[in-house]
């Protein structure tokens, strides 16, 4: 109990034996070992749980990196980050170039379609303005105006009688 502070010592003395046992159980002591201890031994075991190892001993066992090694690691990390950024930029550039190429191809297809439609429209306009097409339209419009005369000579008197009644 000499290795703990005065306040910690007082706290341990005021704590019940059952509470001390539960603390040791939490510290993963076996139940058989705890049951063999008397009150003084319980307080001593709990006091050992409060002891913090000497920081200088802990620091001596830890291998601290030097400033140069830290700078070297930092530099390596920065180089990796720069390489990753460059790779991302290259990917974006390649993606953008592919997108522009697709756009150009699509525009070429649309231009070709537009030219084809213009050619079809010009051919239609030329056909509509021709004498043969105008004659055909006129014949189609007049076709339903006149009554069709039969080829049978027996029906001729009836045809002329119907025409007179009109």
Image (cartoon, rainbow, N blue to C red):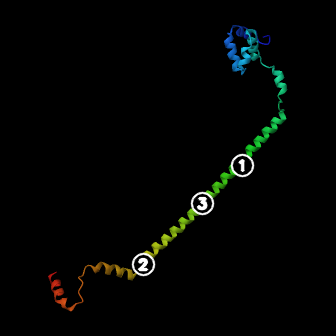
Q: CA distance from mark 2 to mark 1?
A: 61 Å
Q: Residues within 10 Å of mark 1 (few under 14, many from 20)?
A: few
Question: Mark 2 sits on what residue?
Answer: 127
* Residue bearing mark 3: 102
The mark closer to the camera, 2 or 1, is 1
Relative vertical location of residue 131 with respect to residue 11 in this rendering, above or below: below
> Looking at the picture, how far across and down is residue 142, in whole percent?
28, 80
Quarter occupied by residue 101: bottom right
61 relative to 22, above or below: below
Residue at 43%, 75% in the rendered image:
124
Question: In the rendered structure, which disc, 2 or 3, sits on the residue that comes first in sequence?
Answer: 3
Question: Residue 85: where, in percent of width, then height?
Answer: 70, 46
Q: Indicate which label's residue lies in the foreground, 2 or 3.
A: 3
The one nearer the camera, 113 or 127, is: 113
Question: Circle 1 sits on which residue?
Answer: 86
Q: Quadrant of the N terminus?
A: top right
Q: Are marks 2 and 3 in contact (CB under 8 Å)?
A: no
**Relative to 127, 114 lies left or right:** right
SS class of the residue under badge 1? helix
CA–CA distance between discs 3 and 1? 24 Å
């Amino acid at each position: 109990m000499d290795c703990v502070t005065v306040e910690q010592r007082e706290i341990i003395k005021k704590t019940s034996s059952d509470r001390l046992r539960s603390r040791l159980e939490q510290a993963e002591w076996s139940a058989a070992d705890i049951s063999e201890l008397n009150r003084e031994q319980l307080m001593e075991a709990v006091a050992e749980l409060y002891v913090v190892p000497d920081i200088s001993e802990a620091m001596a066992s830890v291998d601290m990196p030097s400033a140069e090694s830290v700078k070297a690691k930092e530099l390596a990390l920065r180089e990796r980050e720069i390489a990753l950024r460059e790779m991302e930029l290259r990917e974006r550039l390649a993606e953008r170039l592919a997108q522009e190429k697709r756009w150009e191809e699509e525009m070429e297809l649309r231009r070709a379609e537009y030219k084809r439609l213009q050619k079809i429209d010009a051919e239609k306009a030329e056909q509509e303005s021709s004498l043969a097409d105008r004659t055909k339209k006129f014949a189609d419009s007049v076709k339903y105006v006149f009554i069709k005369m039969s080829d049978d000579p027996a029906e001729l008197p009836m045809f002329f009688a119907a025409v007179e009644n009109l």
